C-alpha cells in the first residue's frame, strides 16, 4: 500500500529541515538532528542546535468526495542552553528554518495551492532544570484527500 498524502507531506517537510547544514549555506547544522513527536534532550556529544517538530491535531473541513484538511505543525529551534551565545544560535536556527521550509507555497505540489502558511514565532516552554532553550514557528499545511483514500 502506498503512503498517505499526510505521510508524504510530513516526509517532505522533514527532508527540507534536514538540509539545514553550514556546508549548504545555512548558519547552523541544526538539520543534523531532527526530532518529531518527542521532547528532545541534548547530551554533550549532540550538536549545539537541533530541530523538534510537533504535529498538532488536524482540522478537517468540507467532507464531500474530497476532505479539506488543515494540519498545524510547529517547528522548534532547540539549543543547548549551556553553550556560549545560545540565544544567538536560536535566532540563527529560526532563520534557517524559514529559508528551508519557505521555498514555495505548496511544498512541491503536495499541498493545496498556497497551502503553506506561516504563523507566529513563540517561545518554547522550559521545564525547571531543562538545559534546552528555543522557540517554535507555527505552520499550517492545507491539503485535501479523497474520502476513504488518504
Image (cartoon, rainbow, N blue to C red):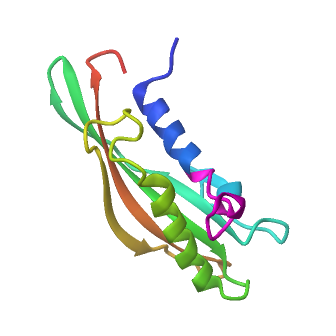
Residue 117 in the image: x percent, y percent? Answer: 30, 54
Q: Which residues are magenta?
A: 17-30
Q: Quadrant of residue 150?
A: top left
Look at 52% across and 11% down and name the residue there: 1
Q: Is residue 123 left or right of residue 80?
A: left
Look at 49% across and 44% down and name the residue there: 13
Q: Is residue 83 above or below residue 77?
A: below
Q: Is residue 133 above or below residue 71?
A: below
Q: Who is closer to the viewer here, 112 or 1? A: 112
Q: Who is closer to the viewer here, 88 or 77? A: 88
Q: Is residue 140 above or below residue 43?
A: above
Look at 41% across and 27% down and name the residue there: 5
Residue 30 in the image: x percent, y percent? Answer: 65, 63
Residue 60 in the image: x percent, y percent? Answer: 24, 36
Q: Is residue 59 left or right of residue 106?
A: left
Residue 87 in the image: x percent, y percent? Answer: 58, 84
The answer to whether residue 118 of the structure is visible from this angle is yes
Q: As drawn, which residue projects farthest toward the right?
A: 45
Residue 26 located within the stretch drawn in magenta: yes
Q: How many marks?
A: 0
Amino acid at each position: 500500500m502506498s503512503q498517505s498524502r499526510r505521510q508524504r507531506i510530513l516526509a517532505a517537510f522533514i527532508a527540507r529541515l534536514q538540509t539545514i547544514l553550514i556546508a549548504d549555506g545555512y548558519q547552523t547544522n541544526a538539520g543534523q538532528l531532527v526530532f518529531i513527536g518527542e521532547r528532545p534532550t541534548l547530551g554533550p556529544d549532540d550538536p549545539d542546535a537541533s530541530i523538534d517538530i510537533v504535529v498538532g491535531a488536524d482540522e478537517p473541513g468540507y467532507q464531500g468526495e474530497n476532505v479539506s484538511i488543515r494540519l498545524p505543525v510547529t517547528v522548534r529551534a532547540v539549543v543547548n542552553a549551556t553553550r556560549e551565545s545560545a540565544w544567538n544560535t536560536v535566532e540563527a536556527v529560526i532563520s534557517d528554518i524559514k529559508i528551508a521550509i519557505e521555498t514555495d507555497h505548496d511544498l512541491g505540489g503536495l499541498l493545496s495551492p498556497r497551502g503553506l502558511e506561516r504563523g507566529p514565532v513563540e517561545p518554547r516552554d522550559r521545564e525547571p532544570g531543562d538545559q534546552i532553550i528555543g522557540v517554535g514557528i507555527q505552520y499550517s499545511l492545507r491539503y485535501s484527500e479523497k474520502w476513504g483514500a488518504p
